[in-house]
Image: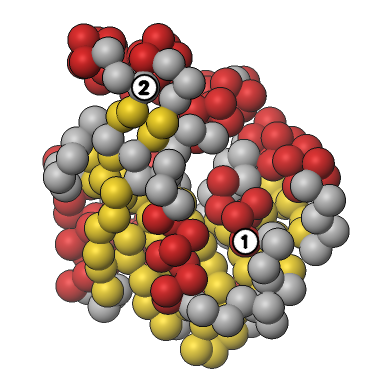
Amino acid sequence: MPNHDEIYAGEAGMYEQLVAREDRDHQIERTIRSLLPELAEVDAADIGAGTGRLTCMLAPHVRSVVAIDRAPAMLEVAKQRLEEAGMTNWTVRVGEHRQLPAADASVDLVTAGWTICYEASSNHPDWKLRLEAILREARRITRPGGLMIIFETFGTGCEQPSPPDFLTAYYRELEHAYGFDHRWIRTDMEFESAEEAARLCRFFFGDELADAVKAKGSPIVPECTGVWWKRL
């Protein structure tokens, strides 16, 4: 399996090539809109923002958005994308989930896409404490009644949910210990060719998925994504 920390630190451009192919049917934006239809007066924080997948989606619609990530290289790509889109209502800040560089009660929406999983997987013996600290920070920066939306993998290369074993305890904790609502959506990836699909999947997901994608010979890779949300 590729080392994601190394990718985030040094290969942000290639990572952006991959995520730009995700969600061919725009289910992520539709989901956010269904949970928070009125965005014009919303101040948002996108934690673990990466190259700006959610930040760039939100920026045209919200009053302001801050993208927070611990990898400066990823934020540089996000910054470039926002500038190229002509957006002016944004900031980027280097920071950690458990010590967010944002003021108390400063946002109405917190999004966290494919990121808390790195702290809350069962590979960490103290994952529950890490998750508790992350959610405490999210509550701290959110105004009363604000919304938190979490997106995580529910299976890449899968047409039906197949979450990784090392994340299922974290997902249960969100629902049963913290009271998050949950649904899953399809966020299939569509590449320019089957060859590109195999190449970029190998880069991030590893040989097993890439070999399956290559054998299938399709530019479309199915993907399931879990969504959790809660008013804080």
Does any portion of residue 3 appear in the rendered image?
no
Kindly give the residue lying farthest to the bottom in the view shown.
144
Disc number lying in front (2 or 1): 2
Q: Position of residue 65 (x, y in %)?
A: 69, 64
Q: Is residue 170 above or below residue 208?
A: below
Q: Separation of disc 2 and disc 1 at Cα?
A: 27 Å
- Looking at the image, which is closer to me, 78 or 186? 186
What amino acid does circle 1 point to? Leu
Q: Is residue 4 left or right of residue 219?
A: right
Q: Which residue is mark 1?
A: 58
- Looking at the image, which is closer to me, 70 or 201? 201
The residue tagged with tag 1: helix, strand or loop?
helix
- Looking at the image, which is closer to me, 97 or 92? 92
At a point 25% along the width and 58% down the height, the residue shown is 184
Check the picture and name the quadrant holding the N terminus.
Answer: top left
Badge number at residue 219:
2
Q: Is residue 41 above or below residue 14?
A: below
Q: Position of residue 203 (x, y in %)?
A: 43, 16
